[in-house]
């Protein structure tokens, strides 16, 4: 905050308007810019207001009115005459703040230098106080490295959203990225590339023209990526990042770094391979490839995101398996040289988790992962709404996005990966991305003003402690699969064996070539537990003993 006073600001709510929240926020912003401020209070009559202006002699006058536009017109005309008679009109800057309908009336009067409707960014308010013209370009340097931007924006989390219009060409996505950048609502745009772009970018002969644009933007050349990146060089200059390739991993990473300045790499251990049909590599070899990808980015100080846990969660794995996957991933990320680890937790995965048990599982994963934290292995928390959790009904989906975001704020995330409310119906358009981001911004700002501590709930803490204990049991069992291995938890053969033996298993892996898919799970009191054929929960110790 500036300590040297740069001027004085006087503001108040006029006439019969008692709404003061907007005025006080404006005065707070003025104080942050070094102004001395004076508030005349709610429902200030015009004569008292003008007398205060004469006595206080401010540099900026703030007028607020949020009631009927017709009444505002009469009041604004009377205020103009009184300011002129007092000899201050044209000598002081006069700002107005109110609802959009009243702002339209304020636009009829030339003596207002700047008109606020409550939709302005802090940068616009600061620019107005500095005397810049409305609409003038605000000179702000937006950090272009992920960790630097996290620290710059704190305590607000970075906001991120996938975007890629499923189409035969990239032009709609280019236009959408430019629109989102200008809206200044996201810090990170994640390119949603189609499957051929991820798996067959360097093998055009394997690409299927019939699947062009299926599930995302059809990126086919480096020129495509450069064009998408250039579209983001406006507004708040959002970072770009993309899915990692599922084949030719290092070559793909080099290309993303060269073209879109990939903000961070996202990878897993057990997924994006032949086991889930997203790539050609067998499981053990795929684990090696992901480890090499971690090392490549670690050597270049590029953050790495672990999207491991939610892939197990989306397949209805027992909570303890999901937690174990988080522990194993963090172990590998540190082992292979990652310096900035973006730990991602997807809430509502699966959707039938209760909020209480979901938060407990998240806290267990955070605590388990935090055992690896050190000066050279920093952990950044990223939270997101469940990919499969949005209702199809758009109104209900909007509500779901808001409540999910409030739950996510309990862990004080550094990044929020927004899943647009339209996800269950269709891939989000640029307008829907912007709308979803504005909804999340509102929830974040509300939460940062002060929320009850949901993490302190005794039921949450009991479940967290239980999961940590069970996870250590499962991890120890996996380590024991090959006592001769120097590091079983980073040994691709041992990790693949943990899957084939059913220690790491999920119901939706049934009939899979790499996993038995034999574990049964049910939502029991909101938690996802392994159960027997009768639906009765099985303790983890019993499940492990029967498998080994």
Image (cartoon, rainbow, N blue to C red):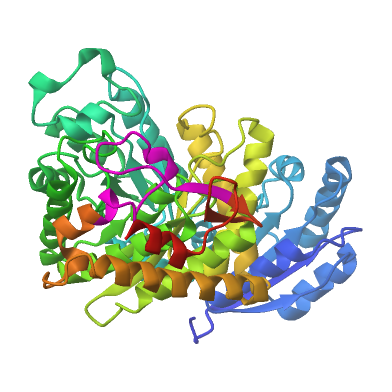
Which quadrant would residue 147 be assigned to in this image?
bottom left
What predominant SS class does the magenta segment belong to? loop
The residue that appears at 42% across and 36% down in the rendered structure is 179
Query: Is 383 located above or below residue 163 in the figure?
Result: below
Judging depth in this view, the residue of 292 and 8 nearest the camera is 292
Query: Is 103 located above or below residue 217 in the figure?
Result: below
The residue that appears at 54% across and 33% down in the rendered structure is 422
How far across and how far down the image is residue 470, in percent?
45, 70
How far across and how far down the image is residue 53, in percent?
76, 72
Which quadrant would residue 279 be assigned to in this image?
top left
Asked whether residue 257 appears in the rendered view, the answer is: no
Query: Is 107 located above or below residue 199 in the figure?
Result: below
Determine whether, in the image, residue 516 is placed left or right of residue 10: left
Judging depth in this view, the residue of 372 and 510 nearest the camera is 510
How far across and how far down the image is residue 275, in percent?
26, 39
The residue that appears at 35% across and 27% down in the rendered structure is 215
How far across and how far down the image is residue 396, in percent?
68, 38
Residue bounds of the magenta highlight: 498-522
Query: Is 360 located above or below residue 532 in the figure?
Result: below
The residue that appears at 52% across and 68% down in the rendered structure is 411
Asked whether residue 375 appears in the rendered view, the answer is: yes
């Amino acid at each position: 905050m500036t300590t040297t006073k740069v001027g004085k600001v006087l503001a108040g709510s006029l006439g019969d308007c008692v709404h003061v929240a907007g005025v006080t926020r404006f005065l707070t912003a003025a104080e942050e810019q070094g102004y001395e401020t004076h508030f005349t209070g709610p429902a200030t009559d015009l004569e008292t207001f003008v007398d205060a202006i004469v006595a206080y002699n401010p540099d900026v006058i703030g007028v607020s009115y949020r009631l009927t536009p017709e009444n505002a017109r009469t009041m604004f005309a009377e205020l103009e005459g009184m300011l002129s008679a007092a000899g201050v009109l044209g000598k002081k800057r006069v700002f107005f703040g109110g609802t959009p309908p009243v702002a339209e009336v304020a636009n009829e009067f030339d003596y207002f230098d700047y008109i606020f409707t409550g939709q302005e960014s802090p940068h616009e308010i600061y620019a107005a106080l500095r005397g810049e013209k409305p609409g003038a370009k605000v000179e702000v340097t937006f950090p272009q490295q992920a960790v630097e931007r996290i620290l710059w924006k704190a305590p607000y989390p970075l906001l991120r959203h996938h975007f890629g219009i499923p189409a035969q060409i990239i032009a709609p996505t280019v236009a959408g990225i430019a629109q989102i950048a200008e809206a200044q609502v996201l810090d990170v745009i994640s390119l949603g590339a189609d499957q051929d772009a991820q798996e067959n970018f360097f093998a055009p002969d394997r690409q299927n023209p019939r699947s062009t644009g299926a599930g995302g933007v059809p990126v086919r050349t480096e020129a495509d990526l450069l064009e998408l990146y250039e579209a983001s060089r406006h507004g708040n200059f959002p970072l770009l990042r993309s899915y990692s390739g599922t084949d030719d991993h290092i070559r793909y990473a080099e290309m993303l770094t060269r073209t879109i300045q990939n903000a961070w790499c996202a990878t897993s251990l057990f997924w994006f391979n032949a086991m889930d049909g997203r790539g050609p590599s067998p499981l053990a070899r795929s684990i090696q490839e992901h480890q090499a990808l971690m090392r490549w980015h670690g050597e270049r100080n590029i953050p790495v995101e672990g999207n491991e846990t939610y892939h197990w969660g989306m397949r209805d794995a027992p909570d303890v398996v999901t937690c174990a996957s988080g522990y194993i991933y963090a172990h590998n990320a540190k082992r292979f040289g990652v310096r900035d680890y973006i730990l991602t937790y997807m809430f509502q995965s699966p959707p039938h988790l209760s909020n209480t048990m979901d938060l407990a599982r998240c806290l267990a994963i955070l605590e388990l992962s935090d055992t690896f934290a050190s000066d050279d292995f920093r952990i950044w928390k990223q939270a997101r709404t469940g990919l499969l959790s949005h209702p199809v009904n758009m109104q209900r989906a909007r509500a779901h996005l808001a409540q999910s975001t409030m739950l996510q704020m309990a862990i004080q995330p550094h990044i929020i990966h927004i899943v647009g409310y339209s996800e269950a119906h269709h891939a989000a358009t640029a307008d829907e991305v912007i709308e979803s981001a504005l909804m999340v911004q509102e929830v974040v700002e509300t939460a940062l003003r002060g929320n009850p501590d949901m993490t302190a709930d005794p039921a949450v803490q009991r479940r967290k402690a239980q999961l940590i204990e069970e996870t250590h049991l499962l991890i120890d069992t996996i380590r024991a699969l090959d006592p001769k291995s120097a590091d079983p938890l980073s040994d691709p053969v041992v990790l693949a064996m943990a899957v084939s033996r059913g220690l790491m298993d999920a119901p939706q892996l049934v009939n899979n070539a790499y996993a038995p898919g034999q574990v049964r799970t049910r939502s029991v009191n909101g938690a996802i537990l392994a159960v027997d054929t009768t639906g009765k929960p099985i303790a983890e110790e019993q499940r492990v003993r029967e498998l080994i």
